[in-house]
Each structure stands twice: as structure tokens, then as C-alpha cells.
Image: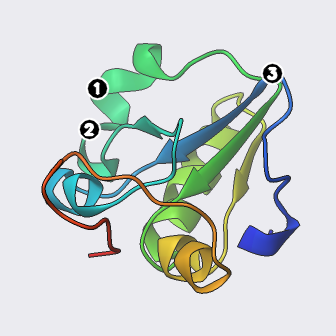
Amino acid sequence: MQPEELPTELPDGSVLLDVREHEEWRAGHAPGAVHIPMSEIVQRLDDIPEADQLYVVCRSGGRSAKVTAYLNANGWDAVNVERGMNGWAATGRPLVSDDPSGEPYVL
């Protein structure tokens, strides 16, 4: 799925899962996204919120494609967000940062 195909506000029962690393998340992420780095997915499966639809995003779509395949093979209904946060930002979607003094950006 392309970022521009996602509803501006995700419907109830949908979750955006960001699988980028901690420094990427701190630089800028989608408001309301859940953060579990790809390197921690297997150990943190219980931290993935229950969702009717799980959208998985990384920086450009490669890591999220791998996580999506893994989750789908293990019972989730996951969709990869192609072009990732690069595509998200390019389409003008909002970003927030964990650094209150900095402007959010995609790292």
C-alpha cells in the first residue's frame, strides 16, 4: 500500500507500526504510531496492539516488507507501507518528533 492510500485518520481497529530504529523514531514519526524496531519484533510480539488491520512502516519499505511477511506468516493481518516514511513525508503527511526543540524529519 502506498502512503497516500492510507486514510488520514486510521479507522478504529487499525494500527500503524513503525519498525525503524530508535534514533530514526526520535527524529520524526507519524503521530499515533506504535514503535517496535525490527530488531526487537520477535521478542516483543506481545507488545503489538490487537488490530483488525496493521500497517507496517520503516524508512523506505524494505524492513517493513520483511516484518509484514513475518507477521502475516504468524497470524497477523499486516500490510506493508511502500516507500515508508520517506513516502509519508513526501506526500505531506504530518510528522512529530521526540525532540521538542527540533523540527521532525525522516532519518
Q: Amino acid at mark 2?
A: Glu
Quadrant of residue 23 within the rendered picture:
bottom left
Mark 1 lies on a secondary structure that is: helix
Which amino acid type corresponds to the residue marked 1 in the rendered image?
Answer: Gln
Amino acid residing under circle 3:
Gly
Residue 31 point in image, percent of width and height: 51, 44
Q: Where is residue 82 shown, x and y percent of the image?
A: 66, 75
Residue 13, numbered label:
3
What is the spatial separation of the Cα atoms under label 3 and label 1, in whole angstroms?
Answer: 23 Å
Horizontal and vertical percent position of residue 6:
81, 58
Q: Residue 9 at x, y = what percent? A: 78, 42
Residue at x 72% of width, y 70% of height: 3
Residue 83: assigned label: none
Front position in the image: 12 or 1:
12
| Numbered tag placed on residue 40 in the rendering | 2
Residue 5 appears in view: yes
The image quadrant where one finds the C terminus is bottom left
Is residue 2 visible in the rendered structure shown here? no
Check disc 3: other Cα within 10 Å, few if <14, some if 14-19, many if 20+.
few
Residue drawn at x 17%, y 63% as measured from the top left: 102
Element class at badge 2: helix
37 over 88 or under it: above or below: above
